[in-house]
Structure formats: C-alpha cells, structure tokens
Image (cartoon, rainbow, N blue to C red):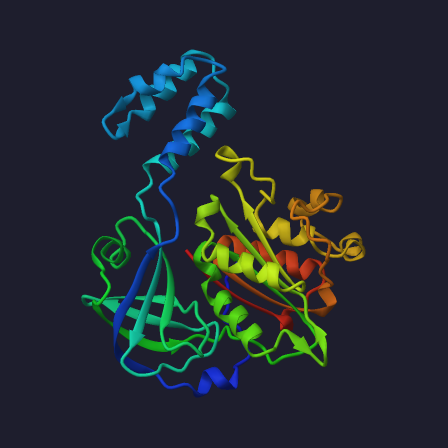
Amino acid sequence: MDLPKHLSQHDRAAQLPLVTEGARVTLVEPMDRNRNNEVLSAVREQIAPVGERSWLAAARSGSTIQWPALLDRLRDAGASKRRLARIETLAERFDRPYPSLLRLRVKPDVDLDFAPGQYVTLRLRNTPRAYSLANSPSEDELEFCIRLVPGGKLTSGLFERVRVGEEVVVRGPNGDMVLDPPSSRDMVFLATGTGVAPFKSMIDYTFEQGRDVVDGKPRDIWLFLGCGWEDDLPHREHFRRLDAQYNHFHFVPTLTREPLLTDWDGATDYVQSVFVNHVKRDALESADLPERFESVRSQRPQSGVDARIDPSNVELYACGISAMVSTLVRAARSVGIPESEMQYEGFG
C-alpha cells in the first residue's frame, strides 16, 4: 500500500518560508543505554535449563562473544527453537552499537518558524538528511531524535564525531502533516521508534497553547508508541511526566522484546494491535476487522488505561515504518475512522 501525502493543505505550513541558516549544536545526549550486563544475565538464564552457564564464558573472546558456537552447543543439547530464537534476539541486542539513539539540539542563527509536525534537512559536513522536529515552535532551539543507521551517510558521522559547538546547516521547514485546527475531537497519535518525533512537537504545542481543552472540555489525547526495548522509546520520561500530569493524556508504550530482559508488564503486541485493543467495544463488535486483528476483540488492554477510543470522534496521526503505517491505516478505516480525519507518513 502506498502512503500518500495528506491531501489537505494547512495554511500555516504553506505560508512558512524555506530558509537555509547556520546553526550550532548545543546538546548531544544518548537516549538509550548500554544494557550488555543485563543481556548476559538473561542469556545465562536461558542457558540454565538445557546446559552449563559456563558455556557463555567459554564462547567469550574479550569483549566479543562467538554466538554461532554457543547456539550450536545449545542445539546439540536439545534447546527448543523458541529458546534459541530468544538467545539470538539477545545476541543482536548485545552486539548493537552504543549509543544507537541520540537526542540532538541545535540553535539556529535566526529564529526558524515552523508548524508542529514538520521536518527540516540537517546538513553536517556536506551530508544532508531530513529529520522531523521534536520540539514546540515556541522554543529557540531545534530538537531531533536520531536512530543510528549502520553505514548511514549522516547518522554514522553524527554518532561518531558530532560535538557540542559544531556548526551545521538547517534547511526548511517542509511537510504537510501538521495539526488540524482545535476541535472537540479526541487526538490519537501512533508511532514506531523515531516516528514519534513530530508527535512530540504536536503534543507539546497542544498543551502549551491550551488546545487540549475545547469549550471547557478536555480532549482525550492518546500516544501509542511501539519499540523493541524500553530504552528505545524516545523521550519516554517526558511522555510519562505528561501522563502523570494530565488525566486526559494517555501514553501507551508497547515493547515486543523488553520481556526478555525485565518483568515488563505493559503491552507487548505491535502498535497497531494495541491501538485496536483500546477502541470502544461496541465499535469493535460492528467493525469488519482484518483477520490479524480478530483476536483483539476479546482481549483486555495490558496498559491499565480505563479510557477507550470512540472512532467516530477522533483525529488520527500515524508515523513510522511504512509497513506498520499501512496496516494501521487499514485497521483505523475498519473501526470507522474517516479518511478525512487521518494523517500519516511512512518511512523505511
């Protein structure tokens, strides 16, 4: 399924000028953690029922581990395919570069006016790449949430060499996925990974400008964010603070791999399924859901949130991996959200 640009033009976005301005890096901060000790502990627990924990030490050579040799030994010992798959997933996490998720802030030479949800092109040492802005337009700095792409032309340089004080070039803003005018509709944001960046800008601006309350009535604002590991959630503490501060803001993270490391008791399914799981029951009962969502009808949400989504009274924004966004849009249509109330962008 192709992901078209949102067809409606928002006047504010259309009126903003395109500019090229110098900027200076003010913050470079990892958002993930080095969890290798946790990973090794989890691997030992996986090995214990079928073999010797000492096998892990035997497979270690300095800071590296010969994972294929360890897995071969476990296969010979009769480890199940499921257990082997868990260890392979943990091995991928152990070998992942650290950091792999950066918070980057830059201060332009002049104020850059943009609409929440837009993106700019960031150029470092003659290498450009487009990134969504993660901050409210009222701030005098620009914030980015950047995932390491191994071998990527710009991200490799950003993670290895960028320092506070370095000069970069910002070009923009661009993009049509911006906030609709305030209305009585609730707001639903769905993202995977760094796809949450434009939604942080939108959500911060919504609360800052009082757009979360219309005609004296608070709007339910939902953020569904899917990742593998807990420390892959960009701006997680920021969203948790908002969730604690506002009864009508619901932060629903879903983590597919975190239970391998911790006793995570939140949602673990894909973000599109978790979204459907929070739709009002009567809407689900009458919906013509794709087959993959049928099992969701009778499940109780793991999030602990009591509120539910009325698909006839929401505006929906989705951003992330294209395959997820495509599936999500189909699910949103099937539960009754009109196309006119959806905006979405996919990448990857």
**Within the image, what quadrant is residue 330 found in?**
bottom right
Q: Residue at x 47, y 22 (%)?
A: 46
Q: Position of residue 92 (x, y in %)?
A: 37, 36
Please say whether residue 286 is visible from this viewpoint.
Answer: yes
Q: Position of residue 126 (x, y in %)?
A: 19, 68
Please say whether residue 257 is visible from this viewpoint.
Answer: no
Quarter of the figure that contains the C terminus? bottom left
Q: For this view, does 83 lie left or right of residue 72?
A: right
Q: Position of residue 316 (x, y in %)?
A: 61, 66
Instruction: Name the outermost residue toward the left.
Output: 125
Q: Foreground: 268 or 141?
A: 141
Q: For this view, does 298 lie left or right of residue 59?
A: right
**Within the image, what quadrant is residue 154 found in?**
bottom left
Q: Foreground: 135 or 226?
A: 135
Q: How many marks overall?
A: 0
Q: Residue at x 37, y 32 (%)?
A: 37
Q: For this view, does 227 lie left or right of residue 292?
A: left
Q: Is residue 243 above or below residue 36?
A: below
Q: Residue at x 46, y 85 (%)?
A: 14
Q: Is residue 163 above or below residue 210?
A: above
Q: Position of residue 191 (x, y in %)?
A: 52, 58
Q: Is residue 21 above or below residue 93?
A: below
Q: Residue at x 60, y 59 (%)?
A: 243
